[in-house]
Amino acid sequence: MSFHTSKPALRLRQGTAPLLISMPHVGTHVPPALAARLTPEAQQVHDTDWHLERLYDFADAIGASVLVATHSRYVVDLNRPPDNQNLYPGQDTTGLCPVDSFDKTPLYASGELPDEAEIAARREAIWQPYHQQLQAELTRLQAAHGTVVLWDAHSIRSVLPRFFEGKLTDLNLGTANGTSCDPALAQTLLAIGQAASGYSAVLNGRFKGGHITRQYGRPAQGVHAVQLEMTQCSYMQEAMPFDYLPEVAARVQPHLRLMLQAALDFARVQQG
């Protein structure tokens, strides 16, 4: 199967502060020729990190750069290594070009799976531009500030038996087991999460950070990367039609903003 897309792989809003917020799983676009090969359920792209731009609508006010994916993770997963290695050995995960959903249902109609050539074409058309832009923006911000924080923003349904037992912790901070950012920053962020009334928080629990956190987090070189995987019930409906719930979201947003401000303060102290 061939692959073609006419839509740019990303949107970038450049800020002035030493903070880049990456949203690799918010995209919902599936090129029409590919969508025709998916099951009706898969065409609804259930496993999207819905509404994160709205949830993080304070990003511009604090001067952050925001990098947003446009295509669905069903097309290509921007938070997976380009060689499709399993980030969590021994645990079930979805791949670079997933073939099943989080509920383990097939994404493709029979006989429509992508071959290696198509996977390579998707990687070249979408994965590479996103990562090139991510690196370029980190380089720009670091040249201006010396130290920069990369915040990889994610969300997921709170109950997903395929990946974890019971209900997921609300605020899952990941720093690749302490290797992707300064431990002091990680502890500050965890303390904010633990102090958030009505929410649970953990550091390097089930979600330790995906490819982006692990690839770009280089604390010794002044790039500190943190992933936040949030439960979707903290701000939206977890079932169709996946609506944003403004009153629910308004309760968690102040805690999110405190975390991002703490990340900014950390970067500025490092450069100061």
Image (spheres, rainbow, N blue to C red):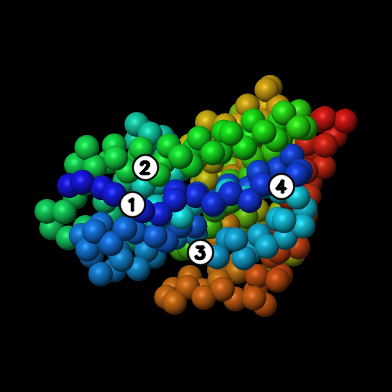
Q: What whole-number distance in Å separates the C-alpha atoms at marks 4 and 3? A: 23 Å
Q: Amino acid at mark 4?
A: Gly
Q: Nearer the viewer, residue 11 or 272?
A: 11
> Given this view, does label 4 or label 3 mark the residue nearer the observer?
4
Q: Residue furthest left?
A: 111
Q: Is residue 143 visible?
A: yes
Q: Residue furthest right?
A: 272
Question: Residue under circle 3?
Answer: 50
Residues tagged 4 and 3 counted as in contact (Cβ below 8 A): no
Residue 84 percent across, percent down from the top left: 34, 35
Q: What whole-number distance in Å separates the C-alpha atoms at marks 2 and 3? A: 23 Å
Question: Residue under circle 2?
Answer: 125
> Given this view, does label 2 or label 3 mark the residue nearer the observer?
2
| Position of 244 relative to 16 (above/below) | below
Q: What whole-number distance in Å separates the C-alpha atoms at marks 2 and 4? A: 25 Å
Question: Residue under circle 1?
Answer: 5
Q: Quadrant of residue 270?
A: top right
Query: Tag 4: Cα neighbours inside 10 Å, few (<14), some, or many (≥20)?
Result: some
Residues tagged 2 and 1 counted as in contact (Cβ below 8 A): yes
Residue 45 percent across, percent down from the top left: 37, 63
Q: Amino acid at mark 2?
A: Ala
Q: Which secondary structure lies at badge 4?
A: loop
Q: Amino acid at mark 1?
A: Thr
